[in-house]
Image (spheres, rainbow, N blue to C red):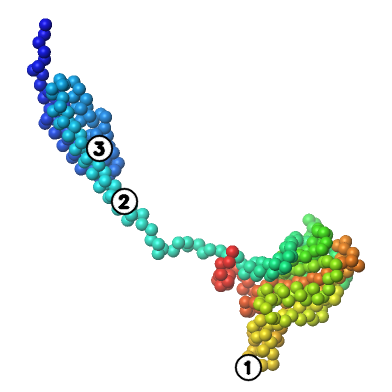
Amino acid sequence: MSAPNSSYDPVEVTPLHPEEVDRMRAEALAAITAANDLGELKEVRLAHAGDRSPLALANREIGALPPTARKEAGQRVGTARRDVSDALKRREADLEAERDARVLVEEAVDVTLPWDRTPRGGRHPVTTIADRMADIFVGMGFEVVEGPEIEAEWFNFDALNFLPDHPARAMQDTFYVADDEGGESGRLLRTHTSPVQVRALLDRELPVYVVAPGKTFRTDELDATHTPVFHQLEGLVVDRGITMAHLRGAMDAFVAGMFGAGLATRFRASYFPFTEPSGEVDMQCFVCRGASVGDPDAPCRTCSSEGWIELGGCGLVNPRVLRAAGVDPDVYSGWAFGVGVERTLMFSQGIADMRDMVEGDVRFTRAYGMEI
Ligand code: FA5
């Protein structure tokens, strides 16, 4: 029978030897202090506090000791492991604080730097004013319609009562579109927005209340008051019992909407093949309100001291146009007008030269703001 193993000495288990535990603890604390960043600290944690670390392995040996020796060895290893764990926490907090301070400096944003080196674009003032002009009619219940820029000659001229050899065709110098062999194609770049009148009448039920903004083309030379590519706003009403009085009322509302209340309008006789009678509509000058007329001491640049500004052409829709669009002129009548958008922008903003509008220099456009 063997005697109880009462002479077992725990210090003989090498990893639990006090100096050995102190050495492991000291090594761990030195490694923690030497870790320069959170990445290194992670490795140190694995090596000195992980499941396979010397102190964790020593801890496992405690179970092999006799019960009387376990307490002391357990306290020794436990204290060493707690010291290492506390040191890890402190070092981690320090390294995190260092990292945060560094990030604040390295990733600082200089809010005084220019935020966008590419200047923002904006809508061209011609587009903006065309929208504003059309919006006044939208406010009165009109619909905005469009037509093609490459148009059939029939819509641009024939349906609008421009007879084939009538000199009126020469009133609007035309870009014709050639067919594949260079011959006549029957198509052209529309010289005005009036062909949209006929398209609108053919496309929809009566009554018709429409405005048609759009691009138009004429073989005019580019100069201070002309451009070969420009814009017009067309207006058309066809309903029962429409008279010149309705046209006048619409023009008054348009002028009030664009330039403010209280400005008079006037009609002057004119000629367009597609309206009868035809007129030019003028508005009272919104700058001098007529005060500059005959007063050499107070000249007005906006109206050239004439007191009136020409808006565009207008009239009652010629019954021939109504017939071409399948509308019975004995039942229906209508009015139409056409205004130049560039000209409206010129006089409303005091622009002296139309070339500024087409040359694409952003310094011109920018002056009108970045309305989008
Ligand atoms: C016409 O084009 C008619 N269709 C207007 C009309 C519509 C009359 C409906 C009656 C009823 P006119 O050729 O006058 O008309 O041109 C109208 C406006 O377009 C002119 O007042 C002018 O402001 C503008 N315009 C004409 N040619 C040019 C051009 N080359 N450059 C810039 N604007 C132009």
Distance of label 1 from label 3 (alpha carbons): 93 Å
In this rendering, position of residue 135 left or right of residue 161: left
Q: State whether residue 74 is above or below residue 235.
A: above
Percent from the top left, x then y, of residue 191? 76, 68
Other residues around mark 3 within 10 Å, as few (<14) / some (14–19) / many (≥20): many
Q: Which residue is mark 1?
A: 297
SS under mark 1? loop
| Amino acid under disc 3 | Val
Q: Closer to the camera: disc 3 or disc 2?
A: 2
As drawn, which residue projects farthest toward the right? 330
In the picture, the disc for residue 100 is 2
- Residue drawn 67% across the image and 85% down it: 289
| Amino acid under disc 1 | Asp
Whether the residue carrying mark 3 lies under 8 Å from ligand 1 is answered with no
Distance of label 3 from label 2 (alpha carbons): 21 Å
Q: Which residue is mark 3?
A: 44
